[in-house]
Image (cartoon, grey):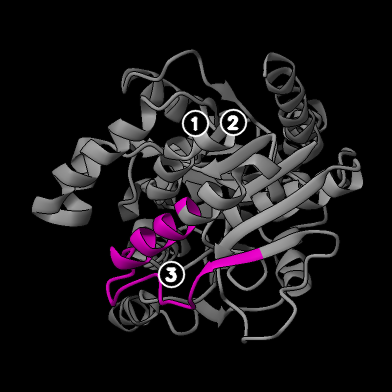
Amino acid sequence: MRICLVYDCLFPHTIGGAERWYRNLAERLVGEGHEVTYLTLRQWDRGADPGVEGVDVVAVGPRMSLYGPKSTRRILPPLVFGAGVLWHLLRHGRAFDVVHTASFPYFSLLAAAAARRVGGYAVVADWHEVWSSEYWREYLGRLGRVGELVQRLCARVRQRAFCFSHLHGRRLSALGLRGVPTVLRGEWAGTLERPDPAPPDPVALFAGRLIPEKRAPALVAAVALAAATRPELRGAVYGDGPDRAAVQAEIDAHGAEDLVSTPGFVDSGELEEALRHALCLVLPSRREGYGLIVVEAASLGVPSVVVAAPDNAATEFIEDGVNGFVARSAGPEDLAAAILAVADGDTALRQSTADWFGVHSEELSLGRSLTQVLEAYEELNVRR
């Protein structure tokens, strides 16, 4: 089959869960013998090879800064990308059987739908997140209503829809999607074997982009409070971003220079080794479309602490007391209580986390999701 993948970012030129998903999908499709084109914005030096073997990577827009000073998406790049996708598909759409696009940043999905009559292809859309009205207002202020309307228009486009959590699947259906979205639970590309947990160091570890939604600074006060009960406890914040200064400010405010370290961005091997020996992963995010780092921690037998929040799909991976805990809030008392509960669980909790991963690894595997996507392609192609 001839597949066109559409996303404005490309791994490893930008790093994120969606980027990894489309890179893995492209490579799997090529490995299965399909022809793959990848439409994106240019993120590499002009004239350089974008570096995806066997995939025709096409830049349909120039190199642009996607994020503004507050780490929110700028409005111009999605418009430019949507126009580039529309122009490419109007000219070359007949070369594809399926156009598979991320729903966000929306205009690429609208472009794929608009050019479908000319191209004759089927449209597949991934909904990594479906934003609530409240979050739209917070994200864009008065323009949030416009963003919410565009999201609703995209949901009502005729498409085969995939979501990566039940939370966002329900939200997508509520927006008026035609049909039922398929929930893909698997994005884990590592080993599926039950892990043999390493002995833990007394470190509560955060890993991720330091952006406001992740609430990394909350770890500092929680560790300081928990250390009053267990003096051996420490914290570590891995990652970088606009909230790095806020993390340091919390360390200074709590006099926690000896309690919480900030290694910043490190290579994947170093992070995996640190996570393997951590007491627990702490992810205080209020918004997660999936939460792959929680699965990664479980694959090492490391329990996780996440936070109950209306937009946090990572809670779907946690069974309280089995592979971690869901804290009631990101407040110091609630987070500290969850960290202490992990410490009390000790080796037994690490073993039950390993057991949990062993039971669910196939469901959570990238291979399982890619197989479901390929089956959907075949079904759509037969209908065409």
Q: Is residue 289 above or below residue 375?
A: below
Left or right: where 379 falls relative to 123? right
Left or right: where 220 falls relative to 136? right
Q: Is residue 330 above or below residue 264?
A: above
**Residue 69 magenta-highlighted:** yes
Q: Is there a contact, CB below 8 Å, between mark 2 and mark 1?
A: yes
Label 3 is placed on what type of residue? Leu
* Residue positioned 73% across, 70% down in the render: 268
* Residue positioned 36% across, 46% down in the render: 334
> Which one is closest to the eye, mark 1 or mark 3?
1
Q: Residues within 10 Å of mark 1 (few under 14, many from 20)?
A: few
SS category of the residue bearing label 2: loop
Residue named by callout 2: 120
Residue named by callout 1: 117
Q: CA distance from mark 3 to mark 2?
A: 42 Å
Residue named by callout 3: 210
Q: Residues within 10 Å of mark 2 (few under 14, many from 20)?
A: some
Instruction: Report the span colored magenta.
Output: 58-86
Label 2 is placed on what type of residue? Gly
Q: Is residue 14 visible?
A: yes
> Which one is closest to the eye, mark 3 or mark 2?
2
Q: Residues within 10 Å of mark 3 (few under 14, many from 20)?
A: many
* Residue 15 position by quadrant: bottom right
Which label's residue is closer to the chain start, 3 or 2?
2
